[in-house]
Image (cartoon, helix red, strand yellow):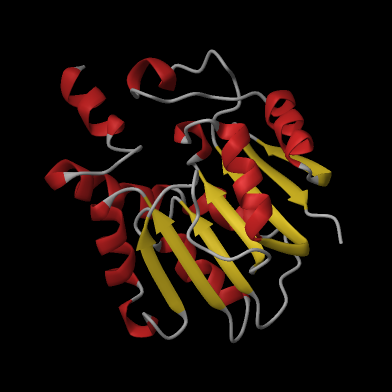
């Protein structure tokens, strides 16, 4: 149990050899959730997009494929994640893809920069989530969408006992926080076994 806990705690901030293994696992295992969630979005060519908690960079790569001529930014608190995301997207790094280390609590981007912001399996670990959501709102263009994708939506989730620092939010809790941050027309999409995508809009 100790080894398992150590492995999965690397979800929040991958570090060292075990963190690198977790990043490979996440790039593969988050694919079904991410692809399903992205299918709910009406992509346009030439978008500027941000993936917060970009992990191993697989979501960045998927975003690029859905918007011709796009520019995609990625940010993660983990140095290992940043290195992996840069490696996965090496062919277009600093041309169409830009990855840096940082936190959702203080995004290093100007106001109204992004057409789409994504957060895949990461809001569980954001400190002061309401404050982070307001920061996401700040960097979005009017009319832009914010897509949160999660696999756990039960506040008594077994994962909170395995992963240190993890908080699981119910759909009702997440929607209220999005509403309070200023997002409108929030859609909640759910799919078995426990996939959920929340799509919030910044008013035009």
Query: Please, is residue 99 above or below residue 151 in the view?
Result: below
Q: Is residue 42 left or right of residue 135?
A: right
In-front residue for pair 114/59 = 114
Q: Quadrant of the C terminus?
A: bottom right
Q: Residue 14: x and y, percent?
A: 26, 44
Q: Please tell me in which quadrant of the rendered image residue 197 appears.
A: top right
Q: Quadrant of the N terminus?
A: top left
Query: What is the number of callouts on the image?
Result: 0
In-front residue for pair 33/118 = 118
Q: What's the residue at 38%, 67% (across, down)?
A: 99
Q: What's the residue at 49%, 41% (across, down)?
A: 121
Q: Please tell me in which quadrant of the rendered image residue 47 appears.
A: bottom right
Query: Please, is residue 29 above or below residue 161 in the view?
Result: below
Q: Residue 199: x and y, percent?
A: 73, 48
Query: Please, is residue 47 above or below residue 110 in the view?
Result: below
Q: Residue 89: x and y, percent?
A: 36, 74
In-front residue for pair 37/113 = 113
């Amino acid at each position: 149990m100790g080894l398992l806990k150590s492995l999965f705690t690397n979800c929040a901030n991958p570090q060292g050899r075990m963190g690198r293994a977790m990043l490979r696992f996440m790039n593969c295992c988050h694919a079904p959730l991410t692809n399903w969630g992205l299918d709910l979005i009406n992509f346009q060519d030439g978008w500027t997009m941000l993936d917060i908690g970009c992990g191993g960079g697989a979501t960045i790569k998927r975003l690029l494929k859905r918007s011709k001529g796009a520019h995609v930014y990625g940010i993660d608190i983990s140095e290992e994640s940043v290195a992996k995301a840069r490696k996965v997207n090496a062919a277009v790094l600093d041309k169409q893809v830009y990855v840096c280390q940082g936190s959702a609590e203080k995004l290093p981007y100007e106001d109204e920069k992004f057409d789409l912001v994504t957060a895949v399996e990461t809001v569980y670990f954001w400190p002061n989530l309401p404050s982070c959501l307001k920061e996401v709102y700040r960097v979005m263009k009017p009319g832009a969408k914010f897509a949160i994708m999660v696999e756990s939506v039960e506040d008594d989730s077994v994962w909170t006992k395995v992963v240190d620092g993890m908080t699981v939010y119910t759909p009702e809790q997440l929607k209220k926080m999005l509403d309070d941050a200023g997002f409108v027309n929030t859609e909640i999409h759910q799919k078995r076994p426990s996939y959920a995508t929340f799509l919030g809009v910044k008013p035009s």
